Image: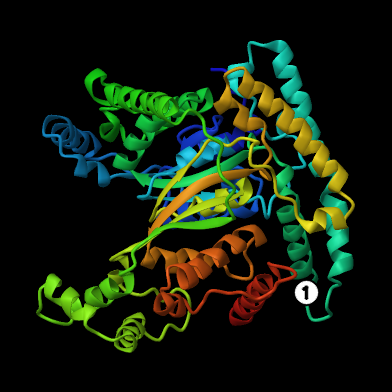
Amino acid sequence: MTLWFSTDEFTEEERQLLQPYFSNVDGPVFALINLPEVVKGALFARYSRTPKSIRRLFLDEFAEIVAAGHMADVGVKHAEDIYERIFLEYGDDSVAQLGGVHLACEQASQLLTKVIERGRLAGYLEQSTRYITYDDKPGGRWRYMIPPEIEADAELRQRYVEVLDGAFETYAKWIDPMQQHFREMYPKKRADPDGVYKATIRAKACDTLRGMLPVATKSNVGMYGSGQVYEHLLMKMRAHPLEEVREYSDLVLAELRKVIPAFLARVDVEDRGIEWSRYFERTRERTREVVAGSLQSPTPDPRPLVTLTDWDPDAETKLVAAAMYAVTNLPDDQLLSAAHKLSAEEKSRIITAYAGERTNRRHKPGRSFERTGYRFDVLCDYGAFRDLQRHRMLSIEWQRLSTGSGFAVSPDIDGAGALGDWERVMRSCASLADDLASRGMEDVAQYAIPMAFRIRFVMQMSIREAFHLIELRSSPQGHPNYRAVAHEMHRLIRDVAGHRAVADAMRYVDYSDVDLERLEAERRTAARKKERAAKHD
């Protein structure tokens, strides 16, 4: 094992408290066991706003209120025998959906978190760069991954460490000055509690500076998934080109086998899991070879932030036919023919009625909006990508991150006087990444690239998912960079696809100008806390 991880220091008493509820007390990957579901969910929910590990959170907040003792083991062996017979002998994959695990995946690079979070049928919550400052050094190191691929080259490793240390030192140097810059720009209003104002200023500073953080930056991910989800994840991880991902898969498998061993019996069977992983690897490499020979490395044409590359000109007509289906007794093709004969006003009236009187953005229209959809090509900074990538009810594919498309920079970087340091970090990291790529380590080179650099990815989604993504990611508390992506998607649906009835139904797309993105949300949070406190008095 070449991966290095910092470890929490626990007293012997703390270790005894932890052991009944965690599959291990020392490693970065562990399962939560013998705990009520509500406690597991609460622990993972705290990930986004704390630098603490789950085990430390448990000790600080939950240990005293959780009943002592283990859950009974009655019937476990018998159940595993049944699962093994159905799963292996009959090949009924659906039984692997019946067992789930809350898994903590800590100290994972940004590249690894994207692999972990790629599955659709699972729940995830990741540590946020908005609420956490990466200015500490657990175990004496800045929080970034040193790729195992360079460990054997002492000179290259030293250069890598010097460059990434420099990026983290510069990021940490600007945390306080950037907050002061925003305090001067947006003075505190008398009505705002100190906590609300401080949290908002801090989030604004973190949002602005996160582009300095390299993709090697470590994060914590909480995940809940079924045995089937984990099996597929492990197959993919074992076929991944990065050693970090492959080594981490062994840690994941070891912990899952302590909790749901029967569901993972096929993972390392030669003609099952091992062969599946080889298939994924062979397919990836062969496709890359064939495409490289066919395209001969053309230069990409210039593209804007978002391009609508594919849509259905008859989308609104098909949507109308789908909306009529459940309230009639007519066959689908007859309804489509009828919808074609309706006027634009009649179609709009049906779409409006079907979308309903939405009183908030969580009122999503029905599944008829899944009848057709859109395909967007996006070129934005990696920081915004990592937020948008979490939308799983769509098809997303991304390209290898490189320095070729340049980097984004907020005007506030210049306004605060940090532009020189920002550009210095971008240059030094880009030079390292380009050198790694020139040595044939294009995948490894991604670790060294700061999150301000742009990545190209495609998102294909139904109209229904477009409602969810665009309305959520355009909300005032969102990061400015992904708000811009959401705004452009909405504009393209309305003006390029010409789907005005659909665009109008997205009534919670927010175009308002925002100075302090988190301020109103923090105000609402403070008001809810005050209301709850009043109820308990």
Category of crowding for the residue at label 1, using alpha-carbon neighbours closer than 10 angstroms: few (below 14), some (14–19), many (at least 20): few
Query: Which quarter of the picture shows residue 474?
Result: bottom right
Coloring applied to the structure: rainbow
Measured along the vertical axis of the image, is residue 18 above or below residue 484?
A: above
Image location of residue 397, percent across then percent down: 44, 44
**Mark 1 lies on residue:** 193
Query: Which quarter of the picture shows residue 305?
Result: bottom right
Query: Which quarter of the picture shows residue 278?
Result: top left
Drawn side of residue 537 relative to residue 333, left or right:
right
Q: Of residues 468 and 140, which is closer to you in this image?
A: 468
Q: Looking at the image, can residue 237 be seen? A: yes
Image location of residue 531, percent across then percent down: 62, 80
Drawn side of residue 495 relative to residue 355, left or right:
right
Query: Measuring 84% from the left and 73% from the top, which residue is drawn there?
Result: 188
Drawn side of residue 66 relative to residue 230, left or right:
right
Q: Of residues 275 and 495, which is closer to you in this image?
A: 495
Q: How many marks?
A: 1
Image location of residue 114, percent across then percent down: 50, 41
Measured along the vertical axis of the image, is residue 330 above or below residue 461?
A: below
Q: Of residues 363 and 535, which is closer to you in this image?
A: 363
Measured along the vertical axis of the image, is residue 83 above or below residue 122?
A: above
Q: Of residues 217 and 131, which is closer to you in this image?
A: 217
Query: Measuring 24% from the left and 85% from the top, which residue is drawn there?
Result: 342
Give the quadrant of the C terminus. bottom right
Query: Measuring 40% from the left and 75% from the top, which residue is drawn there?
Result: 502
Q: Secondary structure at mark 1?
A: loop
Q: Amino acid at mark 1?
A: Pro
Query: Measuring 58% from the left and 21% from the top, which residue is drawn there?
Result: 441
Image location of residue 7, percent across then percent down: 63, 30
Q: Looking at the image, can residue 63 be seen? A: no
